Image: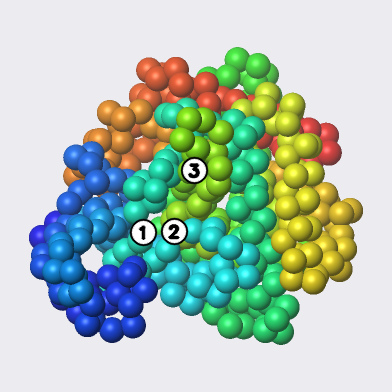
Amino acid sequence: MASAALELSNSDIQGLCQKYLHQDDSTGFDIVSYKMKPTSDAPAGYLGSHFYLQVTLRLHDSNELKHLRFFSKMAPVGNESRMEYLEDFGVFQKEIAVYLHVLPDLQKVSGDVAPKCYYADKNILVFENLADQGYRMGSGRDGLLNYEHLLSCLKTLAALHAGSIIQEKRLGKNLIETHPKVVEENAYPSNKPPEHLRNVNFNNSCEVLKEFVKTIPKYQKKMKYILDNFTPRMSKMFELVKTSKKYQNALLHGDLWANNIMFQYGKYGETPLECRFVDFQLARYAPPASDLMTVLTIPTTSEFREKHMDELLVEYYRFMKEFLKRANLDINDIMPEQQYYESVEEYRILGLIESCLFCHLVMLPPSSTQKLTGSEEGFNDFFSRHRINICMEAFNTDELYRNRLVDMLQDFVDHFILSETN
């Protein structure tokens, strides 16, 4: 924590506070003190550490003290293996670029889709603290979102996608032309050798998931066929994340599971008023259906999707139409309805692949997560050696983890391995 705080100079703190207070110079206040404080005692996660940046100012006009609290995310301190992984992965550099070069102009045309960012450099990002504004995550450990939360999410998602398209139309250039590094694929790169960490990680994930499939009774008679075809079908992901030559592309979040969506609620109700997306570390430039099917699959069950998928797809298209209309753009010229539903059908498998790949990791019970993120040895064990053992232990002992993974895997196997149409 100490080394993280030292990365921010007095000048850095002065600048981000000026942005927060909407001041053009430093004549309005003096920095009295600042410090970093962990958001909790528990490890924050695999791809970063989370802190509150607490700043005390003295205002010149009144001489009173003002206390500010920001949310800060930075690369993990004191873990060489994880830092090497992150540098290879490129997540911090990408997110910094998204917040510096893309989101500011995008949000001017479509409204806020992400927290305001006041500093982005040196593997550190400093944001407004959404929690102080009543924002919180909308799911429990099961990672599920209900209809109202998803509807709120789809409105923000349409704002993100429409804002990207509007900017592209106004500039006459797409994101690959204006900011290629921002949308360079880092989660599923197809131009890397087999030994690249992301390819190794993908294959290790598939091996874990196949072990889960082996335990499902209804597949025993067709097990060899399923296992032989499992990884090849999962590998379709590497093609689907690419920029499309067939469909309209847009800036995508690329990582839409429940923990990356913050909801703001009314004073007395549980129905969300609006939401913001966080963690743009896997942003890409591809068809909106990729984000759409991810957020309608990872935080839902197959039963929920059977009941509500069609109406939620209608709502997203309605939101897109309205955002584009405000910019005097006709959705029929950009995303005709028939083409929209064709893309949804084509990218449905992506949502299930993402569900399986994400959830076998992020839904691990707290005891497993503590072991993995709490030490360099635990991180190495998971990403290099003992992933199957760790996940199988959770699968065999934690009912919630097992039920969620089985639901996803059955949907994937039934529709994209055993189905006669595939």
Kind of residue at disc 2: Pro
Front-lying residue, 66 or 198: 66
Is residue 361 visible from the viewing direction of this image? no
Kind of residue at disc 3: Phe
Q: Mark 2: few, some, or many residues within 10 Å (few <14, many ≥20)?
A: some
Quadrant of residue 24 within the rendered picture = bottom left
**Which mark is drawn over residue 340?**
none
Where, quadrant-wise, is the C terminus in this rendering? top right
Name the residue that disc number 3 marks: 263
Name the residue that disc number 1 marks: 128
Kind of residue at disc 1: Glu
* Residue 36, placed above or below residue 30: above
Front-lying residue, 287 or 115: 115
Q: Report helix, strand or loop for mark 2.
A: loop
Position of residue 146 measured from the top left corner of the image (x, y, whole percent): 59, 31
Q: Are marks 3 and 2 in contact (CB under 8 Å)?
A: no
Front-lying residue, 99 or 257: 99
* Residue 49, placed above or below residue 186: above
Position of residue 26 measured from the top left corner of the image (x, y, whole percent): 23, 81
Q: Report helix, strand or loop for mark 1.
A: strand
Position of residue 251 measured from the top left corner of the image (x, y, whole percent): 61, 66
Quadrant of residue 240 within the rendered picture = bottom right
The residue under the point 38% across, 17% down is 397
Q: Residue furthest front?
A: 62
Mark 1 and mark 2: span between their CA atoms? 6 Å
Name the residue that disc number 2 marks: 115
Q: Mark 3: few, some, or many residues within 10 Å (few <14, many ≥20)?
A: many
Position of residue 327 measured from the top left corner of the image (x, y, whole percent): 74, 71
